[in-house]
Amino acid sequence: MKPRQKILSLLLLCALSSAAQTGNTYAFLDLPAASRNAALGGQAITIYDNNLTLAFDNPAHLTLATHNDLVFSYANWFKDVNIASAVYGRNLDDKNYFATGFRYVDYGKFQGATETDQPTGTFTAKDMIAEAIYTRWLSPHWSCGVATKVIYSVYEKYQSVGMAFDIGFSYHNIEKGVTAALVCRDAGFQFKGYYSIDGRQRYESLPVNLMLGVSYRLSKIPVRFSFTYHNLQHWDLGYSTSSAVTDNLKQESSARQGVDMFFRHTIWSVEVIPTNYLYFVVAYNHRRHQDMAIASKRSAAGFSFGAGFSVKQFSVGFSILPYQAGNLGFNIDLSIDLASFGIK
């Protein structure tokens, strides 16, 4: 079997195995790993820019230029939710590229209490991911990649250990400014669930995400448009927190519900790239907007904004994600080209 046939077969198997899964654990796997990923709406699967952190979203996007890059990222989501990550790239040869990374999510401290509201002291909640990424270039236009993640999660006394896999396949045509990608993310399992029922371990499914996307860079204007369709394996992405929301959904026509549900699967972004050392980006994630919107109040939820620049051996990126009035999330990262310091 040829390499392209193998990767297509793996993606098909991933899609079939995830068709019945909606995922009800390890939701933190969907959090953006770095500023560029966050600015592009959280699923940057079609951006091919020699940016090491983009391989977190699509493992087929390590390149010759990501060799010896080291990236540190920090994000603050709401008040006490802090996310840190680090990733290092290393090329094995001119067609095989490798990266290893670590992500850490800290949700802060919580006040524990019994069923009768008696305080039991404070506790913490944390998630950790150790990841290895491999990219193979099949030709000048085609690349594929696989990522393996080991997951450790602890919320108070409840602990879980699991493993997840990403598979990506990309087509690149620099002359025409087109990149297309097919990615299956976070297909995996738990070695250990958070709790047991009647002495038997309780296992939950992971948030599998099958995505298809395309980006197009204009030839005469430094602008790139990207479109991603995510969660192909699951149509209903509705989310409601009250009976009032449910009643409002019921009152909508089926056609309107269908249009809304289609757009919940989409992420749109526009980038302005005046030089290879500077970019600006704005994106819109309709699902995030619908999930975070408050009735009778206007909100910028769903939009994300970012910018980045490079100076010699350093690159800096920054992004802002508004959720509701007064609630902003931000990401910042620093990329270092170690080769500039004589490290081969």
Image (cartoon, rainbow, N blue to C red):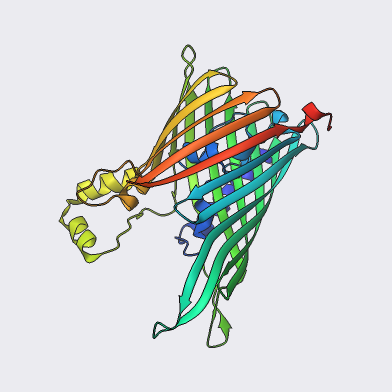
**Which residue appears at 49% of the width and 14% of the height?**
219
Q: Which residue extends farthest top? A: 220
**Which residue appears at 55% of the width and 78% of the height?**
195
Q: Nearer the viewer, residue 142 or 287?
A: 287
**Which residue appears at 70% of the width and 33% of the height?**
336
Q: Quadrant of residue 203?
A: bottom right
Q: Is residue 124 above or below residue 105?
A: below
Please give the count of numbered marks on the rendered protein. Answer: 0
One can see residue 339 in this view: yes
**Which residue appears at 15% of the width and 56% of the height?**
251
One can see residue 207 in this view: no
Residue 337 point in image, percent of width and height? 73, 31
Residue 255 point in image, percent of width and height? 21, 47
Q: Quadrant of the C terminus?
A: top right
138 sits to left or right of 220 = right
Q: Quadrant of residue 141?
A: top right
Q: Nearer the viewer, residue 335 or 185?
A: 335
Q: Is residue 293 above or below residue 188?
A: above
Q: Quadrant of the N terminus?
A: top right
